[in-house]
Amino acid sequence: MTRSGAPDPRRMRAAVALAARGRGLTAPNPSVGCVIVRDGVVVGAGWTQPGGRPHAEAVALEQAGDRAEGADVYVTLEPCAHDSDRGPACADLLAAARPKRVVLAMQDPDARTSGRGIARLRQAGIEVISGLCGDLAAREMNGYLVRQQKGRPRITLKIAVSIDGRVALPSGESQWITGAEARAHVHLVRAEADLIVVGRGTLEADDPSLDVRLPGLGGRSPAIAVMSATLAEIPQATKIAARDPVLLRNFADFDGLPYNDVLIEGGAGMAGSLLAEDRIDRLLVYRAPILLGDQAPGIGQLGLKNLGEAHDRWQLYATRPLGKDRLEIYARL
């Protein structure tokens, strides 16, 4: 039970859950969630809309109307304070709505807003509390935070492997290492990404469609890119040609991309190269209960000089069963 007058973590967790609805749809904006509570009742709720506008606060305030005055506003990120031709600053909208207080999960690292949104609210006489469920909110918008810190999207590598760490048969056959449940989960991950990248080898060997094939989520297939230093253009006969894929020449092309989350679905060679270049922020390892043997390929060369270099790079932070398979999620330390 939350003591009287103290911010309620349940409301912020609800705001984080709302923010999750915008995954993969708002880049380069973060997907933010907002809940407005007056006299213990939710009077407004919203999340960042596709394309990044309207922002979560604007959606929630429109729903709340006059009931926002004197209310508590829970929002997962500091309200924006910079001017935009796409809409008013959320700090100004909140100041005009006159809530009693605004509770934030975290401050916005964007230099255009960082601290300015909080200051503007306080200048309007609104109490501001920051840091409630900050870790939870940061995990939800990790792609946006990586882009702010590193100037590039968060890069996730997805690989399906056998018990002995092999990604294909010696012949190169890799469809399918995992079962139906794991493959369905991959489609969910795709729906939450802004961009999927494959290498030329995967494109030529598998001709993947790289879309989202889950009921109700067909419209959330992300943009597509192929990475190849030698490919002149995307072959028109491929399944992805109609979706206007981008051709990336090297890993530096990731820098400055207007996306928050990039999903790599390349083969062993591309995976090894990206890992060797230390470009991967998150690993999704779908492990199947099968053995493929020593002659089967694994991840490509990593360029490690000794075993010590392999340690203290990755932290396992989540696992879950997916039918007969198991998903392991690792974060770069």
Image (cartoon, rainbow, N blue to C red):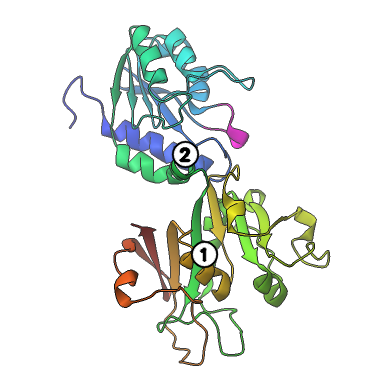
> What numbered label is drawn on residue 304?
none
Please provide the residue range marked out in magenta.
48-54
Q: Amino acid at mark 2?
A: Gln
Horizontal side of 204 relative to 273 (left or right) equals right
Q: Amino acid at mark 1?
A: Leu
Q: Is residue 1 above or below residue 256?
A: above
Q: Is residue 161 above or below residue 66?
A: below
Q: Give coordinates of residue 154: x percent, y percent.
A: 49, 50
Q: Give coordinates of residue 196: x percent, y percent.
A: 61, 57
Horizontal side of 175 relative to 146 (left or right) equals right
Q: Label 2 neighbourhood size at 10 Å, few (<14), some (14-19), many (20+)?
A: some
Q: Secondary structure at mark 1?
A: helix
Q: Is residue 51 magenta?
A: yes
> Label 2, on which residue?
148
Contact flag, marks 2 and 1 (Cβ < 8 Å) = no
Outermost residue, right direction? Answer: 236
**Residue 291 can be seen in this image:** yes
- At 57% from the left and 65% from the top, the residue drawn is 265
Q: How many marks?
A: 2
User: Residue 172's quadrant in the figure?
Assistant: bottom right
Q: Give coordinates of residue 108: x percent, y percent.
A: 41, 30
Q: Which part of the image, by quadrant, shows the N terminus? A: top left
Q: Mark 2 vs mark 1: which is more N-terminal? A: 2
Horizontal side of 136 relative to 32 (left or right) equals left
Q: Label 1 neighbourhood size at 10 Å, few (<14), some (14-19), many (20+)?
A: some
Mark 2 and mark 1: span between their CA atoms? Answer: 21 Å
- At 58% from the left and 42% from the top, the residue drawn is 25
Name the foreground residue: 26 vs 199: 199
> Label 1, on which residue?
274
